[in-house]
DNA sequence: TAACGGTATGTAATAATATAACGTTTTAGA
DNA sequence: TCTAAAACGTTATATTATTACATACCGTTA
C-alpha cells in the first residue's frame, strides 16, 4: 500500500473530511460525509466518526449539537473549542459561527453560584436570518 | 377502552412521562424512559417521543442537546423554553438548570451583527461540579 | 345530540446516528 | 531500529429518532 503522510498536522482521513466540511456552505451530517467520501476510500462510519472526533478536539470543526451536524471553524483564534457560539436560522438552517469577544469574555467569566468552575461552553441561538425574515 | 382525561393540561402519556422525568435526579434518555414506562402501557418509541416533543414545547422539560437527554424544568418562569442554560459536570454527568436573570437578559438582548433576530437560545456550560473537583 | 376538527393514542416498520471490538498499518521519537 | 501512540480498515451492533397509518378522544358549535 502507498505511503501516506500528514498534511497540516492532519492525517489522510482527517484531511479528506476536513476539506469536505470546510468547502461546504452548510453544516454536514456524519452520514452525508460518509456518502461523499466513499469514492476516496472511506467506507465505514467509524472512519468518519474518528476523524470528526479528532477535528472537534483540535478545534478545526465544531459540532452543532441541536442538529448533529458539523461546520468548519471560521475564527482563527478558536484552536481549542472551549467557547463556541452559533446562530441558527430555523427556516433555512443556515448556521453562522459567532465570534464576539465581549460575549465570549462575558460567558467565560460567568461563574455558577453552586461552585462549579466552567471549562467550556456552547451557545446556540435560534431565529430567522435576514433572508428568511 | 377506558376513559382518559387530561390532568394539569397534560394528557395521560404526557403526565406519565413528565412524572418520571420530574422525579429523576438525573437527566433521562428517551429509551430509558421507554423501558421505565412499559409497565404503564407505553410500548413504543413514538409514544415517548411525542410526549417529549410536547413537554419540551410547553416548557415542562428541556432537552440537553449534548446528551440527548431530558430534564424537568425547575424554574417556574420558564413556561416557554426560549432561554435555557445548563451546567453539566463532565465527570458525574450531573446537570443543573441555571436561572440567572442577568445572564438571561444579557443573552436575550444579544444581537447578531449580521441582522439576525433571535427568538431563542440554549447554552450549555461544561466543567467539574463541586463534588468532582 | 350529531357532526367536525384538532389532539392524542397504538402499533409496526424503518431510518438515522453512533459505538464496540479487533486486528493491522503508519507515524513520530528515543 | 525499536517502540509506543495514533491512525486505519472492517464487521457487527447499539442507540436515537421518525414515518406511516389506523383508531380513539375531546371540545366546540350547528
Ligand atoms: Zn470556531
Ligand atoms: Zn434563513
Ligand atoms: Zn426551565
Ligand atoms: Zn460531578
Image (spheres, coloured by chain):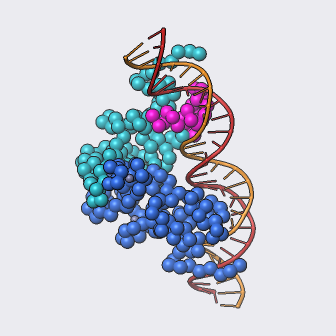
Chain colours: A cyan, B blue, C orange, D red
Q: Is residue A129 above or below residue A40?
A: below
Residue A45 quadrant:
top right
Give, as a single range, the part of the protein colored magenta. Answer: A31-54
State the image coordinates of residue A25 (x, y, percent, origin top left).
Answer: 46, 39
State the image coordinates of residue B78 (x, y, percent, origin top left).
Answer: 38, 68
Specify whether residue A123 is in view: no
Specify whether residue A71 is in view: yes
In which of the image's four quarters is ligand 3 placed?
bottom left
Q: Is residue B95 left or right of residue A32?
A: left
The answer to if A44 sits in the magenta stretch is: yes
Residue at the spot 57% in from the left edge and 40% down from the top edge: A31
Q: Nearer the viewer, residue B9 or A116?
A: A116
Residue at the spot 28% in from the left edge and 56% down from the top edge: A115
Q: Nearer the viewer, residue B79 or B39?
A: B39
Residue at the spot 51% in from the left edge and 70% down from the top edge: B19
Q: Is residue B114 above or below residue D3?
A: below
Q: Is residue C6 left or right of residue B69?
A: right
Residue at the spot 42% in from the left edge and 64% down from the top edge: B81
State the image coordinates of residue D21 (x, y, percent, origin top left).
Answer: 73, 62
Q: Is residue A115 above or below residue A49?
A: below
Q: Is residue A120 above or below residue A113?
A: above
Amino acid at each position: 500500500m502507498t505511503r501516506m503522510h500528514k498534511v497540516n498536522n492532519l492525517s489522510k482521513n482527517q484531511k479528506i473530511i476536513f476539506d469536505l466540511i470546510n468547502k461546504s456552505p452548510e453544516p454536514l451530517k456524519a452520514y452525508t460525509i460518509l456518502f461523499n467520501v466513499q469514492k476516496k476510500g472511506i467506507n465505514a462510519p467509524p472512519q468518519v466518526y474518528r476523524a470528526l472526533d479528532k477535528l472537534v478536539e483540535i478545534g478545526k470543526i465544531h459540532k452543532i449539537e441541536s442538529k448533529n451536524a458539523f461546520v468548519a471553524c471560521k475564527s482563527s483564534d478558536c484552536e481549542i473549542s472551549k467557547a463556541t457560539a452559533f446562530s441558527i436560522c430555523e427556516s433555512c438552517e443556515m448556521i453562522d459561527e459567532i465570534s464576539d469577544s465581549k460575549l465570549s469574555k462575558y460567558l467565560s467569566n460567568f461563574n455558577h453560584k453552586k461552585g462549579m468552575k466552567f471549562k467550556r461552553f456552547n451557545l446556540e441561538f435560534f431565529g430567522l436570518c435576514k433572508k428568511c425574515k
